[in-house]
Amino acid sequence: MHNAEVDDRFAAEAEALQTFTKLARNDQTLRMHNVSADQLFAKQLTPTSYDRQTLFHKMARQEPALFDDFPDPLQPTTMGVFQNGADGVVKRLLRSESTDSYPVRFGRGDSQQHLTISEIMRRWRASGTVLGITDLPVRTSDLGDIFDQDFLAPWNMMPLASAPIKELEMLTSVISTAGKLTDSHSDDMAVCNHCFVGKKLWFAWDTYEGLEAGIEDVERVEVQGRAAFSLEQFLTLDEAFWFFVEPGETIFLPGKYTHRVYTLEDYIGVGSFYVSLLNVLHTASRWHINGSLWDKDTSDQKGQLVDDLFMIATECLAALDDADPELRQAWGCDAIPDAIRHWENAYAPRVTGRPSMKAFVGAMKDAAQRS
Ligand SMILES: O=C(O)CCC(=O)C(=O)O
Ligand SMILES: [Fe+2]
C-alpha cells in the first residue's frame, strides 16, 4: 500500500471504531471488552470495483460481494434526478400520489403503522423519528417508474419464474432513519441491496454456525424480544463479516447468511432477492434441508418450491445451450463448473437423494461441459 492509502485506511478505521463505540452506548450487544481492533477489522468486508466475472465467481462460491461502482438501479428517466443528490430522490418520493399504504416499523419496539409512500417520506424527513421499512414493493407501487426493475437482468431468474415463485420475487425499496435496527434474520433467497442515500452497518454470518454459538435468527428460532447477539461472539465465528453500505455501493449476499442491520444515517435504497444459474443448486439445497420460509404448508415436506425453481432454471439452461457467447457470458455460464464444484462440497451429500435434484444436477453438468 502507498502512504496515502495507509493514511486513508487508518482514518477509515478510526472513524469505524468511533461508530462502534457510539452504537455500543445504546446497544449492549455491541460492547467489546475482550476484543482488539485487529480482530474487528479482520472481519470487515470492504468495497471493490465491480466486474461481472468477480460477481459470478463469488456467487458460485457463496461469497459476499460489495461493490462501489455497480450501475445504479434506476430508470433512465430518473438518472438525472438522482445525480442531483439526495434531494432529488427525496423530492421524487415525497411527490408520490399513491394512496396504497405499507407497514412501517417505528422505534426500538418495532410498533407498526400503515403509511403511504409520501407519508413515510414526510416522517423520514422529520428529525428524531426512528422508522424503517425494508419491503416496500417497487413493481406494484408507483416506485416502478423510479427504480429499474430489471437491474439484475438477464441472469436473475426470479422475474421469469412460475406464479408461485413469482409471489416470492420482490424488488423492494428500503427506507429507514438513523437508529433503526433490522433484527437478525435470514431470507430464503440471496439478497442484493443498493444504497442511494445514507449509511448502514451490516453484520452477516452463517445462520447455523451462529445458532450453535448462541447467536439467534428470528426466522429460524423462537426468540424472546430481540434475537440474542454478541459482537464478541460474532467475531469468533469462521463465516462472519461486517461492512458499511454507503451511497453508490451494492451488496450481494448469499442466502446462507443471517444479517443484522443498523441504519447509521437516514437511508434510501433498493433491495432485490435473486437466484441465478450459479446459486440455484445452493438455494434449492437450503430449501430442502432447512425448509423455505415460503413453503405454503409447514407440516408438509420441506422444499416445496424446489421443483418450480428447477423448472425455470432447466428452461434457461436449454435456451442458453446454443446461444451466442455474449449472452452465455451475461448469464455467468463460465462460472457454472465453479458453482457445481462448490455445491458438491457444501451440500451434495445431504440432498442428492431427491429425484428432482438428480435430474437438474445432470442438466447443470451437461451445461458445465459446454462452458
Ligand atoms: O436494510 C435493512 O435494514 C435490512 C435489509 C435486509 O434485510 C435485506 O435486504 O434482506
Ligand atoms: Fe434480509
Image (cartoon, rainbow, N blue to C red):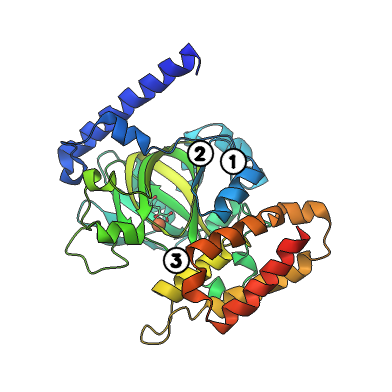
Label 1 within 8 A of ligand 1 by Cβ: no
Q: 231 left or right of 12?
A: left
Contact, CB < 8 Å: mark 1 with mark 3? no
Q: Which mark is residue 188?
A: 3
What kind of element bears circle 3? loop
Q: Where is residue 15 drawn, in percent x and y?
A: 32, 25
Q: Where is residue 268 drawn, in percent x and y?
A: 44, 44
> Marks 2 and 3, how far apart in space?
23 Å
Q: Closer to the N terminus: mark 2 or mark 1?
A: 1
Q: Give the farthest residue toward the bottom.
A: 300
Q: Which residue type carries mark 1? A: Phe
Q: Which mark is residue 70?
A: 1
Contact, CB < 8 Å: mark 2 with mark 1? yes
Q: Where is residue 276 drawn, in percent x and y?
A: 61, 61
Snapshot quadrant of residue 297 = bottom left
| Mark 1 surroundings within 10 Å by alpha-carbon count, few (fewer than 14), some (14 through 19), many (20 or more) | some
The residue positioned 62% from the left and 55% from the top of the image is 338
| Mark 3 surroundings within 10 Å by alpha-carbon count, few (fewer than 14), some (14 through 19), many (20 or more) | many
Q: Closer to the N terminus: mark 2 or mark 3?
A: 3
The residue positioned 26% from the left and 54% from the top of the image is 106
Q: Nearer the viewer, mark 1 or mark 3?
A: 3
Q: Is residue 347 above or below residue 50?
A: below
> Marks 1 and 3, how far apart in space?
24 Å
Q: Which residue type carries mark 3? A: Asp
The one of 219 and 182 positioned closer to us in this rendering: 219
Q: Where is residue 170 drawn, in percent x and y?
A: 51, 63
Residue identifier under label 2: 249
Q: Which residue type carries mark 2? A: Glu
Q: Is residue 230 above or below residue 323?
A: above
Q: Quadrant of the C terminus?
A: bottom right
What kind of element bears circle 2? loop
